[in-house]
Image (cartoon, grey):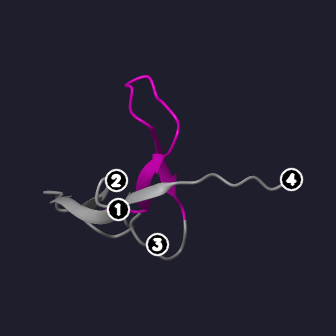
């Protein structure tokens, strides 16, 4: 059985840019540039419609050979 999990990517693999979805304007916008010397080794984001103990959506790492696009 194949299962699919939807993930919203906020930081693409190899990037230091953090994007967020502006639901009011229906766009993906640059939220900030992360001030670190390293970049993310995988796409980083969250699983929509979930809730972790910190009241934020569950974090997710997407392990692909190539980076995806934010959103």
Magenta range = 38-63
Screen quadrant of the C terminus: bottom left
What whole-number distance in Å separates the C-alpha atoms at marks 3 and 1? 19 Å
The answer to whether residue 38 is visible is: no
What whole-number distance in Å separates the C-alpha atoms at marks 3 and 2? 20 Å
Q: Residues within 10 Å of mark 1 (few under 14, many from 20)?
A: few
* Horizontal side of residue 50 vs 32, given as left or right: right
Q: Is residue 28 above or below residue 49?
A: below
Q: Secondary structure at mark 3?
A: loop
What whole-number distance in Å separates the C-alpha atoms at marks 4 and 1? 34 Å
Q: Earlier in the sequence, mark 3 or mark 2?
A: 2
Disc nearest the viewer among 4 and 1: 1
The image quadrant that residue 19 belongs to is bottom left
- As for residue 55 lying within the magenta part, the answer is yes
Q: Nearer the viewer, residue 56 or 14?
A: 56
Q: Secondary structure at mark 1?
A: loop
What whole-number distance in Å separates the C-alpha atoms at marks 2 and 1? 5 Å
Q: Residue at x 42, y 72 (%)?
A: 69
Q: Nearer the viewer, residue 22 or 30?
A: 22
* Horizontal side of residue 23 vs 18, given as left or right: right
Check disc 4 and report the residue beneath it.
1
Check disc 3 and report the residue beneath it.
68
**x%, y% of residue 33?**
16, 61
What whole-number distance in Å separates the C-alpha atoms at marks 4 and 3? 25 Å
Check residue 26 in the rendering and tell me which mark sits there, or answer none: 1
Q: Residue at x 75, y 52 (%)?
A: 3
Q: Earlier in the sequence, mark 4 or mark 3?
A: 4
């Amino acid at each position: 059985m194949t299962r699919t999990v939807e993930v919203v990517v906020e930081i693409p693999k190899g990037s230091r840019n953090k994007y967020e979805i502006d639901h009011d304007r229906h766009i993906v916008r640059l939220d900030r540039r992360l001030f670190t010397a390293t970049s993310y080794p995988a796409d980083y984001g969250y699983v929509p419609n979930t809730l972790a103990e910190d009241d934020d959506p569950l974090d997710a790492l997407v392990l692909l050979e190539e980076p995806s696009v934010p959103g």
